[in-house]
Amino acid sequence: MRLGDIANADAAGYGKPLEGVRVLALEQMQALPFATQLLGRLGADVVKIESPKGGDSGRGAQPGFPDPQGRNVGATFSRNNFNKRSVCVDLKHPRGRGVVLALAPRFDIVAENFKSGALARMGLGYDDVAAVHPGGIYVSISGFGSSPSPYSDWPAYASVVEAMSGQYDYTFADTQPPVPSPMGALGDTASGLFATIGVLAALRHRERTGEGQHVDVAMLDAMVSMADIVPNFYSLGVGRGDHRKTGIMESFRASDGWFVLQVIREHQLGRLAELVGHPDWVTDSRFEVRRNWHTLLESEIRPAIESWAATMTRLEACETLSAAGLAAGPCFRDSEVVVDPHVQAHNMLVELPRPDGGAPVLVPGNPIKMSKVAEGPETRVPWLGEHTDDVLRAELALSDDELKSLRDDGAIA
């Protein structure tokens, strides 16, 4: 889908559900920008506050591409900042702090993902904003939240909280060293999703009561929730690395690569056995107990499946397995994901044109499909400080002289 396209034309004209909701985002990197981008895709007006000294730290990520002024636009930034406006304010400058506090009452939501306590020390914490905007919703995402934690002083990225949730050790146990971020920044995107849910709930609460509140999301809490089997299976006596022994959850080789198959019920094993030419498994006493399937994987199950799939492509194998009622999927390569017919039909990639004329940058689309709400149109990521003057004129009625004074003083850029 190209920028500006409306993919679901039948739903056009109904408007977006969050139109009229305004977000002032003091954000960086991915966790909160992912959440506010989603809110923007649902119709919210998002104004992003960035540091005059390089902006959101995600702009410095690699790989990247140059903006019209030749400054780097990092991959992290380009994935998470569609449908926003950029305003450069120095939060450490007294006049910059004053600008943010003056803006806050004009927004429904003030959101931040600095290290816990950092904005409070600058005079921009929840209490400071609530003092000027009692009905405002203040959203925080940090590694370990605002409540007491032994890790409160630790900086955190997605890989840190993913590791601390137990999922790395649980997946690999003692078979190999843990691999950080095996599926991208789940710790960021999951935290952003929980923050989005919190925002929607807080808006509903305010609608009923008129009250604002603090929505506080700890990234580690989000990851403990996402890595749900770690404490759950532990409590049920399934130890680290043993979760695979509860069924067949493995990758198998076809003629052109790998596919994943999950068989976790006895009737599914019967279907698989018939399909791969081993109906004897159904009456073989070794296969009666589900936990034994893991011990038979390399000696019996894998050779049979991979022999059966040897003349098929991954897609052919999965189509055949699916027709038999078995859950399987090909392990796609990056070049296959971007041309996959499902991904294209669902508008799950948006093209961001590059100012330097290079190939468009591909950014994930909106996975939330609504029958009465149009998808798009998307607006590109903002260049650093692109909307500073426009926003401050419109929101605070600042004159050219006042803007120049703030800029000369280093409070804005």
Image (cartoon, rainbow, N blue to C red):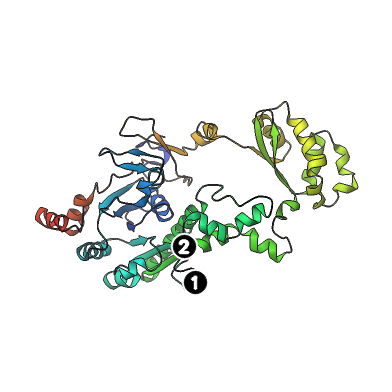
Residue 291, percent from left and from top: 80, 53
Q: Judge whether 93 appears above or below 189 on screen.
A: below
Residue 406, quarter of the rendered image: bottom left
Query: Going 24% across and 57% down the picture, which residue do you hit?
Result: 89
Look at 44% across and 57% down and name the residue there: 196
| Amino acid bearing label 1 | Ser
The image quarter in which residue 315 lies = top right
Q: Of the residues shown, which amino acid type is indicated by label 2?
A: Gly
In this view, the residue farthest toward the left is 401
Query: Where's residue 207, x and y in %?
Result: 38, 66
> What residue does disc 2 label?
143
Q: Which residue appears at 24% of the width and 61% of the height?
A: 103
Report the side of 308 relative to 159 (left or right). Answer: right
Q: Rounded to the nearest whole Å, what is the CA distance between mark 2 and mark 1?
A: 10 Å
Q: On the picture, is 109 further left or further right than 246? A: left
Residue 361 to residue 31: above or below:
above
Say what secondary structure mark 2 lies in: loop
Q: Residue farthest to the front?
A: 177
Q: Which residue is mark 1?
A: 149
